[in-house]
Image (cartoon, helix red, strand yellow):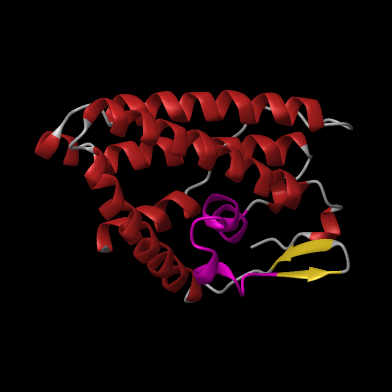
Amino acid sequence: MAVLTEQVLALVTAPVKSTQEAQAQPQAAARALIDTAARRAALTAGALALPPGPLGWATLLPEMLGVWQLQRQLVADLAALHGRSASLGPTQMLWCLFRHTAAQALRDLAVRVGDRLLVQPVTQLLLPQLARAVGLQLGQQVLGRTVGRWVPLAGATAVAAYAYWDTRQVGRAACELFAQPPEAGASD
């Protein structure tokens, strides 16, 4: 679990650049970016889930990291499309990437103020604790994924489908957060 915690922390704190330009109406471009990223994530996860048995176990972490890197770039691109790159900090990245998979761990990270979603900044001391909690949740998912490594084709299909769904959820979370006026989102 410590490896997952370290990977989550590195993932959300490392800067990421986007080549996307801010748009006045980013919805269509955002949908296209989400669709492309979801297909790439499904392909990446499905291909890495093909090796069977113990060899397949060795692909678990590379598969997760590969998908997370795609999702991380998606979040950065969606922030840029919405003109919110300056608002993208570790807290917002953590929220967008893992809100739907580690909701319990992240439940106090965001609040609703009227119809706005506010992701609250966290201290540098709290960020590793949140990453550890997310890492524990993800560790449980890893255990579930190991079963799929014993049935290669069915397992790879299931892993690809999950990566597709998961990436779409990341995109939706990012769009929800960055579609708000800049003063609604907190920055780190």
Which corner quadrant of the image does residue 171 belong to? top right
Identified at 12% across, 37% down, the residue is 53
Tell me residue 71's x, y (percent). 52, 39
Which corner quadrant of the image does residue 3 belong to? bottom left
**Quadrant of the image for the N terminus?**
bottom left
Tell me residue 70's x, y (percent). 48, 34
Which contiguous range is marked in magenta?
A: 89-110
- Up-down: is 128 above or below 161? below
Tell me residue 32's x, y (percent). 69, 24
- Is residue 42 toward the left or the right of residue 118 in the image? left
Tell me residue 121's x, y (percent). 64, 69
Residue situated in front as seen by the camera: 45 or 149: 149
- Up-down: is 31 above or below 83? above
- Is residue 91 toward the left or the right of residue 149 in the image? right
Can residue 16 be seen in this snapshot? Answer: no
- Up-down: is 153 above or below 99? above
